[in-house]
């Protein structure tokens, strides 16, 4: 083997997407989040996943890693799954409208039926409690998917995550504030309410 071939192979192994980042400690961020949320119903399912039940909303929380050059991020994703009365498939991203100030909730269809997307957009805006919870909510990603007769809501909050740097070495947990916690739980309850009738 030539030196270039060996270097190429080592670089490929280093950048593999399915490999956990160096220094990743499964479950540590979930434990920070458990204490941060302060909810008694938080139950661990595995090293990197947990289950949470608030009122009548059952959620799964999953750690997700994202590698950078000399650092990695550990994000927590809140997953709500429920049966759907609508048929078909679709994937929709929800985001705030406005460049400088938030001026609404927008829905972008990634795949699937456009009619479902229009109906979903109308219901997100029409449900006043859900709209009021989503507007101040600091989320990084919010995706709604319809597949196999089920709705999947995946919400990744800006908080509830950890930044791990290798040089210089440090770890920092980014907490979910009490106000954001309330908005987060209200938004997920609102999603369940809206999707149960769609």
Image (tube, rainbow, N blue to C red):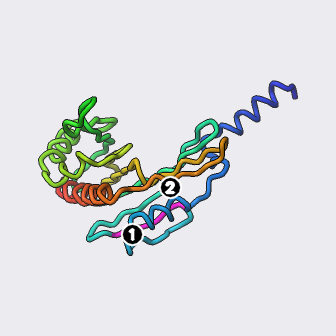
Q: Nearer the viewer, mark 1 or mark 2?
A: 1
Residue under pointer 2: 63
Above or below for 35 versus 11: below
Find numbered disc 2 in the image and state the secondary structure of the residue it sits on.
Answer: strand
Q: Is residue 52 magenta?
A: yes
Above or below for 155 versus 53: above
Residue 149 figure quarter: bottom left
Residue 33 image position (x, y, % from top left): 45, 61
Which dot marks residue 38?
A: 1
Residue 107 figure quarter: top left
Residue 142 image position (x, y, % from top left): 34, 45
Q: Residue at x 58, y 48 (%)?
A: 164
The foreground one among 103 and 45 is 103
In three-dimensional space, the C-alpha distance between marks 1 and 2, rounded to whole angstroms, equals 18 Å
Q: Is residue 82 left or right of residue 61?
A: left
Q: Residue at x 67, y 48 (%)?
A: 22
Q: Residue at x 62, y 36 (%)?
A: 69
Q: Is residue 130 magenta?
A: no
The foreground one among 21 and 111 is 21
View extreme (right): residue: 1
Find numbered disc 1 in the image and state the secondary structure of the residue it sits on.
Answer: loop
Above or below for 49 versus 134: below
Q: Which residues are magenta?
A: 48-53
């Amino acid at each position: 083997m030539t030196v270039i071939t060996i270097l190429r192979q080592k670089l490929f192994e280093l950048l593999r997407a399915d490999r956990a980042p160096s220094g990743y400690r499964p479950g540590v961020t979930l434990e920070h989040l458990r204490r941060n949320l302060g909810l008694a119903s938080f139950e661990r399912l595995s090293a990197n996943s947990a289950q949470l039940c608030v009122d009548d909303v059952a959620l799964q929380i999953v750690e997700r890693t994202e590698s950078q050059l000399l650092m990695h991020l550990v994000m927590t994703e809140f997953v709500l799954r429920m049966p759907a009365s609508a048929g078909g498939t679709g994937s929709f991203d929800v985001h705030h409208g406005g460049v400088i100030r938030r001026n609404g909730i927008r829905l972008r269809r990634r795949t699937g039926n456009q009619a479902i997307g229009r109906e979903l957009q109308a219901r997100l805006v029409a449900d006043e409690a859900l709209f009021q919870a989503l507007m101040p909510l600091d989320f990084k990603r919010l995706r709604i998917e319809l597949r196999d007769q089920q709705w999947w809501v995946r919400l990744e909050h800006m908080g509830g995550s950890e930044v791990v740097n290798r040089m210089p070495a440090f770890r920092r947990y980014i907490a979910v504030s009490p106000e954001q916690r309330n908005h987060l739980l209200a938004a997920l309850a609102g999603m369940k309410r809206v999707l149960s009738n769609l």
